[in-house]
Image (tube, coloured by chain):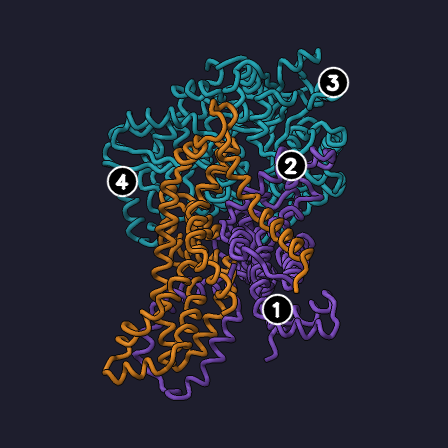
Chain colours: A orange, B cyan, C purple
Amino acid sequence: MESRKEVVFGHLILVIGAFVALYPFVSVLLQALSPAPGSTAQGLTLENFIAAWTRGGFSRSLFNSALVAISVVVATAVAAVLAGYVLSVLKFKWRVLVFALLMIGLVLPSEARIIPLYNFFSSTGLLNTYWALILPQVASSLPLATFWMANYFSQLPDSLGEAAALDGAGEFQTLRYIYAPLGMSAVMTLSCLIFLYTWNEFMLALVLMPDNVAVQTAPLSLSFFAGNERTTEPEVIAAAAVLVALPVVIAYFLLQRRFMSGLLDGAVK
Amino acid sequence: MHRRTFNFMLAASAMSLALATSAGAAEITAPVTPEDIAALGDVTLRVWADAGEEAMLTKLIPLYEETYPNVTVELTLKGWGDLMGTVVNAMNSNTPPDVTNGNQGFAVMGTMVRASLIRPLDDFITAYGIDEGLPASGFASMQWNEDGTAWGQGPIYGMGGATQPLGLFYNKAKLEELGLEAPESIADLEAALVAANEAGELPIMLGNAAQYPLGSHVLGILIDMYSGVDEVNAWIAGNEGSTFDMPGVRKALETLQAWGEAGYFGQGYDGRSLDDAVAAYGAGEGVFFLGGSFNGARLAAVDPDAFGYTLLRGESGEYVTTGTFGTPWHVSSKTQVEPAALAFLGMMLSSDFAQAYADVSRLPNANLETVTPTGSMHEAQLAAARALFADGEFVGYLDWATPTMQRTMGTQAQMLLAGRADVDGFIAAVQDDWQAYQDERAEQ
Amino acid sequence: MSASPLARTDAENRQPERAAGTAGRFVWRHTLYLVPGLVIYALFCLWPLAETVRFSFQRWDGITEPRWVGWRNYLAIFTDPQTLTVFGHGLIMIIFYAVLPLLIGLLIVAIMTRIRIRLLAVFRTVLFLPQILATVVVAVAWRWIYAYDGPINALLTAVGLGHLSRAWLGDFDTALNSVGLIGTWINFGLCMVLFIGGAQKIGRELYEAARLDGAGPFQEFMAVTLPGLRGEISIALVLTVTNALRNFDIVWNTTSGGPGTSTLVPSYLIYEGAFITRNVGFAAAASVVLTLLILVLTGVITRALRQRD
C-alpha cells in the first residue's frame, strides 16, 4: 500500500525532527565536555563539570530539588488517593462542587497567586525554607492528581467495593486493601508527572526562596550561576546545565513509558 | 538616669507602638565598645552585599570576627539586579539582614525609609567621625524626610564606603598605537573616537544586555558633560517644575545618537552582558570603556597598569560626574544585634580600614588623600576622586528619579541607538514616567 | 505544561450514572478524606487567588498602607499602550508556542498516516525530550545557540551569509521571534507525538473508503485525519496556549524583556511590578487579566473542538 518514496520521505522528516529536538541538548553537552579557554586539557574533559559542581554548589541544590519534589509527590499522592476515593467510589454528596473548585486550580497560572504567597511566607517567617516551595506545589498539583485518581477509581467495577462491604470491611479498609493497591500503577504514573513539574518549577522558587543557598533548588541555582559575574566561562555554565538536567533525563529514559503515558494521558483525561 | 526612666515609661505606656519600633531606638554618642558587643553573647550578624563588595568584605570579615569573637558574620552576596529586586522585601520580612547594601532613590531607599525599615545613622556618623573631611553635599542622596517622599534634606539613612564616580577608561597601548593622548574633555574624547573608528578599532566597548549600562552610565556621563548639575539633580529629586527637556540633555542625546550611527559601540552590544564586556575589554577589545570606577577593580586585576582612567571636564570646564559616596550601607531598624551592626559599619568605614579598600583597587571615602594605589590606573582613579571631592560636582544617577526609570531610560536608550526612537520621543517618554510618579507622590 | 480542563468531562460525565445507587446522602465521615487535600488547596491556591483579586483594586508598594483605587489598575492595563503591547507579545507567543507546533505536527502526521513508521518508540522518546527539560536548562542552551559567537552565526558565516549574523536575543528585529522559536522547539515534539498517537486510532477502513472514493493525499487528510484528530488538537492547543502565556522562565533566563521592551511578556510584567518596581496592585490586576485570558482561551478551544459523539 505504502510507496517507497513516501516511506523514505516520511522517515526523513522524522529524522530531521529528532535532530532538531536533540541538537540544543547535545550542543550544550559537547560544549560542557570541551576544554574551557586557558585549560590544558586535550579533547573531551570532565573538568568543567568539576568546576560547576564545586563552585555552583550543585550537590546541595540537587539534593534540595530531590527533597522538595519527593515531598510534593508523596503528600499529593496521599491526599489525592483519599480525595479520589471519596469523590468517585463513596460518591461524596457535594462532589460536583468539589470538582468545580478543583477545576479552578487546573489552569491557574503561578502568577495569579505569587504575590499573596510571598506575603504569607514572608510574614510567617517561612520564606527561604522548604515549606515555601512544598506547600504551594502540593496545592497546585492536587487538582490534576485528584481528577486522575477519581477517574481511575471510577473505572474499576463497583462490585469490588460491594464485595468488600459484604466481607465486613469498612470504607477505609476497602480503600486500604482493595482500591489503593489497585491504584498503585496510576499513582506511579502520576508521581512521575508531578515529580517532573516540581523539579522544573522556576518562578515559585525564584520568589519564595531567593536568599538561602542552603535550600535553593537546582534550576534556581543554575539561573543564578549562569547570571553570576564570577562565571563567565560558557563551558562551565553548560556543564552546570547538564548537571541540572541529567537526573530528569536519566529518569525519563528509564521510565519513558510512564512519563510518556503520564504526560499524554494527563492531557487526555 | 532620668532619661532612661522616661524612655521606660514611654515604652510601658504604649506597648504596641513600642513593639513596632522597639529595637534600635537608642542613639549612640560614642563608638560601640567591645564590652557592649561581648554583652550580646554568641550572635550572628547577617550581612547582604552587592557582589562587587566581595573583595573588600573578604578582608573585613576576618578582621571583624577577630576583634569581636562572639559575633559570626553570615554573608549573602548578590548580583546587582538580584539585590535590587529582593532587598526591600527582605528588609521588610521578619528575618531581615542586620546590615545590607541598598541603593539611593525612591524605589529602594525611599520605600525603606517610608516603611521605617532602616535606622537613621546621624548619631553613628557623628560618634564615629565618619563625615570628617568629606564634602557635606555628598550626603544629600542619603538624606530623606521622614515620610520617605523627598530626599536631599533630613536624617541620613545610609553611607557608602568607597566613592564610585562614572568615568572614562582607556586602553593605553591602543591609544599609543593610534598616536593619541588620553582625553581630558568631551571634545578630546570625540576626536579620539573618530580616530579610533577610522583605524578600524572598536571605539567603545559596551555590554548592554541588562539595559542600564547604556541608559544609566554612558548617557549619564554625556548628560554630565553638557548640563547644569543643579538642574539635573533637581529633576532627579522630583522638584516641582523640573523637566527632562533641558538643552544639555538634548545635546547629550544627540551625541549618543550620533555615536550609535557612527558605529562606535560596534555590533551585538545589546546581547552582551556587562561582565562579559568588562572581561573582553580587559582582554584588549575596544579602545574606551565608559563606566563606573567599580568596573576598574576587575580591569586592575587583569593588569594594574594597562588601562587608564579619567574623569572628563564638561563644557563648563569643571569635572562633573555621576556618583556619590558609593553604594549605601544600611542598618535594619529591626536588628536584634544593633551594637554589632554599628561596629561592623564603623570598622568598614574607618580610616584604619581605608587602605584595605585601596588594596582591592577601590576609592575609599575615608583617607582618600593618603591611601596607596595598586597601580597606575588606580592612581589615576584616586586622583580623579580627590579632585572631585576637592572642588568637583556630584550628579545623582538618573534612575533614582522613579521606581521605573531604570527600565524606561534603558529601553529608550536602546531604541534611540536602534533608530526606533528619536530625541523628542526619548525625552517625552522619560518625562511621562517622571510625571506619573510625581502625581503619585502628590497623592500619598 | 498543565492539565487540560477536559479532565472534567470524563470524571463528571461518569459520575451521575454511577452515583444513582447511593446518591443524595451526606456522610460527615466522608469529609475527613477530603480534608488533607482541600485544606492545602484552599490555603495555597484559592485563598491566594482571592487575595490577588483584592490587591488588584489597590495601590500598594507591598509594604506601607495600601490605598483602595477601584478599577484604576485595570483601566491602566487597558489604556496604557505599553501594557497593551506586552499583552500583544503574549498573543504573538501563542503563534510560536501553539500555532506553529500545531501546523508542524499536522503536516508530519499527514505524511505519517500513509506509511508504517519504523522505530516509532525511539522517535517518540527523542521528540518528547524538549518537554521534560527544565526551562532554565532550555534557556541556557538556547542562549548559547543564539549568541553572537554561537552556532547559528557560525553556520551563517560558513554558508556566506555572515552579514546576517547578529546577537539574536539582543536585536530589536529578532529578539521576540527568537524567544518565540524556543517555544516552538519545546512544543513541536509534543504535538507530533500526540497526533501520531491519535492518527493510529483512526480506523484503517476510513482511509480505504476515502481512497476508493478517489481521494488524493490532501482530500484524505481533510476528510479523515483532521476530523479524527479533533480531540488531540484540542488537548495540544490547551497545553501549548497555556504554556505560551506563562513563559516567564524562558524570558527571565534569556532576555529579561529586552532589548527595549521588545520581549516583555505579561508574566514578566507581573513579576517586575510585584517585586522590582513595587506596584503590587497593578501587577495583581495584570495577573487577573492573564488568568482570565487563559481561562477564556482554553474554554473556547475545548468548546470549539468538542467531539460530537
Question: Which residue type does callout 1 highlight?
Answer: Leu
Disc 2: which residue: B270
Chain ID at mark 4: B
Spatial distance from mark 2 to mark 4, Cα to Cα? 63 Å
Chain ID at mark 2: B
Spatial distance from mark 3 to mark 4, Cα to Cα? 77 Å
Q: Is residue A98 above or below residue A246?
A: below
Q: Is residue C61 left or right of residue B171?
A: left
Disc 3: which residue: B199
Question: Which residue type does callout 2 highlight?
Answer: Asp
Mark 3 nearby-residue class (10 Å; few <14, some 14–19, many ≥20): few
The answer to the question of whether label 3 and label 2 lie on touching residues, with beta carbons closer than 8 A, is no
* Residue A18 seen from this side: yes
Label 2 element class: helix
Q: Is residue A181 left or right of residue B267?
A: left
Chain ID at mark 1: C
Q: Is residue B420 above or below residue C132?
A: above
Mark 1 nearby-residue class (10 Å; few <14, some 14–19, many ≥20): many
Foreground of the two, B81 or B281: B281
x and y percentages locating residue A203 in the rendered image: 49, 51
Q: Is residue A113 left or right of residue A80?
A: right
Residue at horizontal 53%, vertical 39%?
A28
Is label 3 or label 4 in front?
3
Q: Is residue B95 above or below residue A186?
A: above
Question: Which residue type does callout 3 highlight?
Answer: Ala
Is label 2 or label 4 in front?
2
Label 3 element class: loop
* Residue C54 seen from this side: no
Foreground of the two, B280 or B232: B280
